[in-house]
Image (spheres, rainbow, N blue to C red):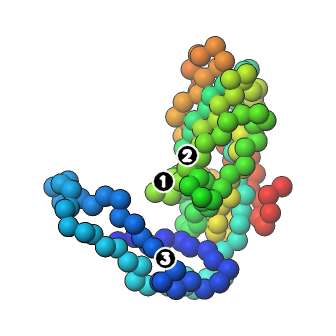
């Protein structure tokens, strides 16, 4: 049903994984009443060299004074790689001092939300996220969509964003 990119220091086996089915629906959208079981049936090495950590920094490039909320999504449109997850969240570092950061990775899409009631000025780097791939991605491999942004006064704004940098190995 699903193929996932997985990086490990030791070679995993199918027994290392537990799959919990939270919901199962039939083709008409009705809940399946019988117990649905999902198993990891195989692990296939991709044949390439070892995946490496790459750190992608996202930046608001337009100028706004006292921006207090920013929500955006990032789709990876390159050939291979995935945003890393730590616990239930994307493995990201908040770069807006004293702000609240929320992140997620759902179906490969990175979601980011930043709130700072006192506001922050831009242009500014916002977040740095770990991306796992064999080769370093390019800035053009990421499609950034601003979902919502506003000033401290509550006025909606439409900031421009870009990938500010991509570093390989360790975050800088």
Answer above or below: position of 61 versus 117: below
Q: Is label 1 in a helix, a strand or a loop? A: strand
Q: Is label 3 in a helix, a strand or a loop? A: loop
* Whole-percent x, y for residue 160 in the image: 64, 33
* Whole-percent x, y for residue 50 in the image: 67, 79
User: Mark 2–mark 1 contact, CB under 8 Å?
Assistant: yes
What is the distance, in whole Å, between disc 3 and disc 1 at their CAs? Answer: 19 Å
> Which of label 2 and label 3 is nearer to you?
3
Q: Residue at x 21, y 56 (%)?
A: 31
> Which of label 3 and label 1 is nearer to you?
3
Disc 2 crowd rating (10 Å Cα; few below 14, some 14-19, many 20+) is: many
Residue 91: quarter of image: bottom right
Q: Residue at x 42, y 79 (%)?
A: 40
Q: Residue at x 40, y 66 (%)?
A: 20
Q: Quadrant of the C terminus?
A: bottom right
Q: Which residue is mark 2?
A: 111
* Residue sitting at the far top: 153
Of the numbered discs 3 and 1, the one sitting upstream in the chain is 3
Q: Which mark is residue 17?
A: 3
Q: Which mark is residue 106?
A: 1
């Amino acid at each position: 049903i699903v193929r996932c990119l997985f990086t490990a220091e030791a070679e995993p086996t199918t027994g290392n994984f537990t799959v919990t089915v939270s919901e199962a629906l039939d083709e008409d959208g009705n809940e399946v009443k019988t117990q649905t079981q999902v198993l990891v049936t195989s692990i296939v090495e991709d044949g390439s060299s070892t995946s490496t950590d790459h750190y992608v920094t996202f930046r608001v490039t337009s100028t706004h004074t006292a921006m207090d909320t920013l929500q955006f999504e990032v789709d990876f449109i390159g050939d291979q790689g995935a945003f890393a997850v730590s616990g239930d969240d994307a493995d990201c570092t908040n770069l807006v001092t004293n702000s609240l950061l929320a992140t997620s990775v759902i179906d490969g899409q990175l979601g980011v939300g930043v709130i700072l009631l006192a506001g922050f000025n831009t242009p500014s780097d916002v977040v740095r996220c770990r991306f796992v791939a064999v080769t370093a991605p390019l800035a053009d491999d990421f499609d950034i969509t601003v979902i919502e942004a506003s000033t401290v006064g509550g006025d909606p704004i439409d900031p421009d964003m870009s990938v500010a940098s991509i570093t390989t190995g360790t975050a800088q």
